[in-house]
Image (cartoon, rainbow, N blue to C red):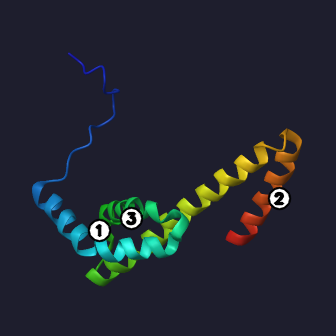
Amino acid sequence: MADVKQPAGVALSQPYAPTVERELTDSYRAHYDSLLTQARDALGPELAHFSGKMAQQAMLATFARRTEFATPQSFDDALHEAVLDEAATQRAAQDLEATLGLLAEQGPIEVERKYARAGVRRALALG
């Protein structure tokens, strides 16, 4: 009988093998304090409560790519870069949410005009 919860042709995700899971846990524990501090600094005091989530997401994303790194130092560098990327994404999401909240109070025509200006400014800042 086919599993109706699992779409055909989609492989079930497999959990990490016990040795890999142990490696992830050890790596996370070894880096957590420095990742948390870096995330707090990057997020600022108003978003510091997201720092644990940012550290966790950075670790998981970097650990999934661990075979790409030739040395432990390159893994560490990528890990700290991932924290900065996660924090930047979180800040941008919060900024956009705040902007949209303010714009929604001003009506639909003004929202479109200001949203377009904000998009241009953000694109210039990222470019």
* 96 relative to 91 in the view: left or right: right
> In this rendering, does residue 53 appear at all?
yes
Circle 3 sits on which residue?
58
| Element marked by disc 1 | helix
* 67 relative to 114 in the view: left or right: left
Q: Give yes or no for contact between labels 2 and 1 (Cβ–Cβ under 8 Å).
A: no
Q: In which image quadrant can residue 120 be found?
A: bottom right
- Amino acid at the residue labelled 3: Ala
Q: Which of marks 3 and 2 is nearer the N terminus?
A: 3
Residue at the image point whose x is 24% and y is 19% from the top: 2
Give coordinates of residue 3: x percent, y percent.
25, 21
- Amino acid at the residue labelled 1: Arg
Choose between 34 and 76: the one closer to the eye.
34
Compared to 47, does 7 lie above or below?
A: above
Q: Which of marks 3 and 1 is nearer the N terminus?
A: 3
Q: In which image quadrant can residue 56 be found?
A: bottom left
**Spatial separation of the CA atoms under disc 2 and disc 1:** 40 Å
Depth check, mark 3 against mark 1: the one in front is 3
Circle 1 sits on which residue?
66
Circle 2 sits on which residue?
117
Q: Give yes or no for contact between labels 3 and 1 (Cβ–Cβ under 8 Å).
A: no
- Amino acid at the residue labelled 2: Arg
